[in-house]
Amino acid sequence: MQIIGSSDLRKYYKEELEGKKIRIDRLVCSVNSLEYSGKLKITNSGLAYIDVRNENEFTKIVFDTLKKVTLQS
């Protein structure tokens, strides 16, 4: 399944994953915007590979977001 936006991701989660025990081994994202473009890969060991334009700013955004998600769990 190709996930294009947050609505696709939400639909996939509700149909396929909700109520099941899941494990994510690796996350690979393509980033396309005016300020940032490139790839982001995060493994289950916590290794993050960031290859984007404006890497320092993008890294701060990613890790601030991950902190927020972790605190909400």
Image (cartoon, grey):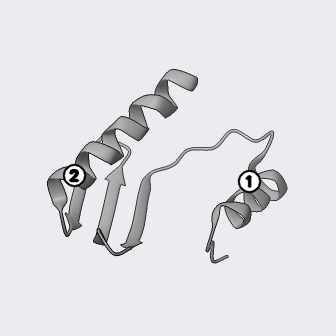
**First in residue order: circle 1 vs circle 2:** 1
**Residue 16 higher or lower than 35, as above or below:** above
**Corner quadrant of residue 35:** bottom left
The residue at 32%/40% (across/down) is: 63
Q: Nearer the viewer, mark 1 or mark 2?
A: 2
The residue at 41%/66% (across/down) is: 29
Residue 36 percent coordinates (x, y)? 29, 68
Residue 37 percent coordinates (x, y)? 30, 74
Local SS, label 2: helix
**Residue 18 higher or lower than 1, as above or below:** above
Q: Nearer the viewer, residue 10 or 53?
A: 53
Asked whether residue 48 appears in the rendered view, the answer is no
Q: Nearer the viewer, residue 60 or 23?
A: 60
The residue at 84%/57% (across/down) is: 15
Q: Which mark is residue 57?
A: 2
> In the image, 52: left or right of 22?
left
Q: Going by the picture, which residue comes out furthest to the front? A: 34
The residue at 19%/69% (across/down) is: 53
Local SS, label 1: helix
Q: Residues within 10 Å of mark 2 (few under 14, many from 20)?
A: few
Q: Which mark is residue 37?
A: none
**Residue 56 higher or lower than 68, as above or below:** below
Q: Which residue is mark 1?
A: 13
Residue 24 percent coordinates (x, y)? 51, 49
Disc 2 residue type? Glu
